[in-house]
């Protein structure tokens, strides 16, 4: 059991005060909350694919209630690193986990937006009741994302294709799958050079794209690249759905008029423990090129048979 505090050569944690008591004075209050929320938290972690032997980071760990639970779930072959900006919290968490006999847990005193932890070193990164307290939750999400370099999800999908000649040519160039019903789909995500590489496989047919945060004129947009084509999209919340709206696009780095951009009714949402997607790619000159809709769950959930049984 150890508690780590960054030194002068690392990223020092920013100081701040908790609105409520911290350290030993917070133990009873926080463990009462944990007793209420832990059943749901445990189910969520299992649905996300947590299993023995995994290496996990727990952001905003407080006095270690969730960290201790995760340490028990991953077992002696796994590990958990709890992160909190308060040294009082991490010191108390270390005492609690040591008393519980856990040897696979350590604590790191650091800002959740800049932890100084090694990149790409965790299988799962988790937080509970943290983001709503941060002035810049997006910075924390980026930090959490950067600690994990790959994951995969599996599910089923329905694929439709445009019938026009230009649509067929465009689909063939990119490698879009053929039209089919209820086909197995797998998506592999890998972080490479600051970008996510998405590898989508529909019934053995594979195509790739990269996604990254927009910069400069594309700031606040999500940029996806298919070969020489870059599409910059706004993420717009529409009720329970997250819509992807094309704002800019370019080919070989040359900006083109937005009225000529690929388009379609594309959105994502979560329901019954599944990630649902509805993607359409069309163009004014070709009509529909490809459309695919379906659902995904983390790969470990699919392989363990914990996929919900409701239809997409």
Image (cartoon, helix red, strand yellow):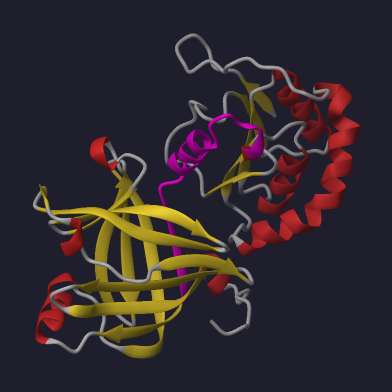
2 lies above or below 139: above
291 lies above or below 14: below
Q: Is residue 305 left or right of residue 255?
A: right
Image quadrant in which the N terminus is located: top right
Q: Is residue 233 left or right of residue 300?
A: left
Q: Position of residue 292 (x, y in %)?
A: 36, 78
Q: Magenta span covers which residues?
A: 132-155
Q: Position of residue 47 (x, y in %)?
A: 63, 64
Pick the residue in front: 79 or 174.
Answer: 174
Pick the residue in front: 80 or 155.
Answer: 155
233 lies above or below 119: below
The residue sitting at 37% across, 42% down in the picture is: 220
Number of numbered callouts drawn: 0
The residue sitting at 49% across, 27% down in the picture is: 114
Q: Is residue 244 left or right of residue 54?
A: left
Q: Position of residue 185 (x, y in %)?
A: 40, 76
Pick the residue in front: 92 or 23.
Answer: 23
The answer to whether residue 104 is magenta is no
Quarter-of-image position of residue 290: bottom left
The residue sitting at 39% across, 91% down in the picture is: 181
Which residue extends farthest top? 8
Pick the residue in front: 132 or 199.
Answer: 132
Q: Position of residue 230 (x, y in %)?
A: 20, 54
Which residue extends farthest front? 259
Quarter-of-image position of residue 105: top right
Quarter-of-image position of residue 15: top right
The answer to whether residue 142 is magenta is yes
The residue sitting at 48% across, 26% down in the picture is: 116
């Amino acid at each position: 059991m150890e508690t780590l505090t960054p030194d002068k050569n690392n990223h020092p944690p920013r100081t701040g005060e908790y609105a409520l008591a911290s350290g030993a004075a917070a133990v009873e209050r926080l463990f009462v909350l944990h007793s209420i929320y832990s059943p749901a938290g445990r189910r969520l972690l299992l649905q996300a694919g947590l299993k023995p032997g995994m290496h996990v980071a727990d952001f905003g760990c407080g006095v270690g209630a969730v960290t201790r639970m995760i340490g028990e779930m991953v077992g002696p072959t796994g590990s958990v690193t709890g992160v909190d900006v308060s040294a009082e919290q991490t010191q108390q968490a270390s005492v609690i986990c040591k008393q519980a006999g856990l040897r696979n847990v350590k604590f790191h005193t650091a800002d959740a937006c800049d932890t100084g932890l090694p990149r790409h070193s965790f299988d799962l990164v988790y937080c509970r009741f943290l983001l709503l307290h941060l002035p810049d939750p997006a910075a924390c999400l980026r930090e959490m994302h950067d600690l994990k370099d790959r994951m995969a999800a599996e599910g089923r999908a329905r694929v439709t294709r445009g019938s026009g000649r230009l649509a067929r040519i465009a689909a063939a160039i990119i490698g879009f799958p053929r039209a089919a019903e209820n086909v197995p789909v797998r998506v592999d995500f890998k972080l490479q050079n600051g970008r996510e590489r998405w590898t989508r496989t529909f019934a053995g047919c594979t195509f790739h794209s990269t996604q990254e945060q927009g910069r400069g004129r594309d700031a606040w947009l999500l940029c996806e690249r298919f070969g020489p084509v870059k599409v910059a999209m706004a993420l717009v919340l529409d009720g329970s759905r997250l819509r992807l709206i094309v704002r800019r696009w370019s080919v070989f780095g040359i900006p083109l008029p937005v009225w000529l951009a690929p388009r379609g009714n594309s959105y994502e949402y979560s329901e019954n423990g599944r990630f649902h997607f509805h993607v359409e790619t069309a163009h004014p000159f070709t009509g529909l090129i490809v459309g695919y809709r379906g659902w995904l769950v983390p790969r470990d959930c699919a392989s363990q048979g914990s996929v919900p049984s409701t239809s997409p």
